[in-house]
Image (cartoon, helix red, strand yellow):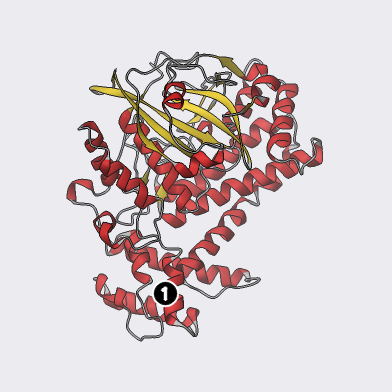
Amino acid sequence: MKFKQDFFTQLPEFYSQVYPQGITNPQWLAWSDDAAQLIGLTQPTDELLLGLSANAAIDGATYYAQVYSGHQFGGYTPRLGDGRSIILGEAVGPNGTWDVALKGGGPTPYSRRGDGRAVMRSAVREFLVSEALYALQVPTTRALAVIGSDLPVWRESQETAAITVRLARSHIRFGHFEFFCHSERGRADKLIQLLNFTITQHYPHLSCDAAGYKAWFLQVVQDTAKMIAHWQAVGFAHGVMNTDNMSILGDSFDFGPFAFLDTFQEDFICNHSDSEGRYAFGQQPGVGLWNLQRLAQALTPVIPSDDLIAILNQYQEALVQPYLHLMRAKLGLPTLVKPTPEQDKQDLELIGRLTVLMEKNQLDYTQTWRQLGKVDPTSQHSGLRDDFIDVAQFDTWYQAYQQRLGTVADVDEWQTERNAVNPKYILRNYLAQEAIIAVEEGNLAPLHRLQKILSQPFAEHIEDEDLAKRPPDWGQGLIMSCSS
């Protein structure tokens, strides 16, 4: 790997240099060829294994942990930082640079008495979800590999340590700006320094002046809204939308107790620490705005409040439009060049009525959308009808749907297009758990099989259809802890 070190050299007060601690008897548990290409790698090697397991220094790496703060479950924590993630630098790839981080590389000054380790189950889950979201075309950080070990660590019981090698276009979070606004070192010059760096590195088309700052914040609002629109469309619950887990670039980031919906449930909670449902699936759009408001607060020393408020007022539209675009594609609705507000309202109502029916009839979110690809939309009766207990309500919805759909000239083409946007396979929590159990028993085959299928979620994979089934009773609606 060839590294740049722009963050390290230009922002010396924004991190602490710290060297990772190696894990014993490292082994490759999983590897992403696709992610590897981003930074010019071709295959896992013994030399790379030693470097990424922190058992040997990597040429050009600087090793540091970033400092930031954040709002966690609504309350402000003034000092957080990378407690178990150590960044090597920005690896130069064929089409840009990617931060390379060892998640689980040992304690840092921000570990808050923690050991800085990641357990194997959490490392595997982060690897799988990063690559699964990417394959679903959701903005996300990536995962290069998972490295396992025999190093014991304690959580609820003794487990083994592992490292996820994360790739991110940037590790800058909302919490970075909060830290340098609200801490004792909170000075406008530091905010401007961070802002100028972010714009120069990631928004080079913008200027580092008052006009550029406003344009940048608008882009952050739009990118965040687009990310959450994708989450809602694919049925993904992040679980811990603290401001320190929000990427400034609008990439899905910092995975813990996440889940894809099985049975559709608007108020589904995937994090057992979230007793009040602050981060429930249906709350995510509102939380996104709340988090952006906290970011706006931190930016008031450099951007006028009236401008920040005016930009925040565009959030709803910035979320609704990509969401409608994605959902219209899932439904196969004809494209509207310039939909009117009334047309948007009608389509949102059509989508909402379907999800209400899904919830009322306890239907699987992903399977229901996939079944749509088998429907003959020109037929009076839909094959979906038999999945609904309340047949009359479904018939009413289906009639409205057909009216909105209009004429379908080529049914086969229409069905093929639906299967290209409605995945057959998602990372169900029970599948991840089964793969983790197999790894614990020394069997990597289920993990590699699951990774392969998730990398092509829209294909049929007839021989692997068991991975598309609804969960067994024990695996329905699993919730996870933050150590997951």
Q: Compared to 479, does 473 lie above or below?
A: below
Location of the N terminus by quadrant is top right
Which residue is located at x 61 percent, y 57 percent?
Answer: 317
Which residue is depicted at the point 23% across and 31% down? 440
Instruction: Report which residue position mark 1 lands on.
Output: 415
State the residue at coordinates (26%, 44%): 446
Quick check: 341 left or right of 114?
A: right
Q: How many numbered circles are shown?
A: 1
Q: Residues within 10 Å of mark 1 (few under 14, many from 20)?
A: some
Relative image position of residue 106 (x, y in whole percent): 42, 17
- On the image, the x and y values in percent for residue 409 come to 49, 85
Q: Position of residue 410 (x, y in %)?
A: 47, 83
Asked where in the image residue 301 lies, by quadrant, the reply is: top right
| In the depicted structure, whether residue 321 falls above or below residue 93 | below
In the figure, is residue 421 to the left or right of 65?
A: left
Direction left: furthest residue: 473
Q: Position of residue 199 (x, y in %)?
A: 72, 36
Front residue of 103/226: it is: 103
Name the residue type under label 1.
Gln
**In the visual, does 209 lie left or right of 7?**
right
| Residue 267 appears in the picture as rendered | no
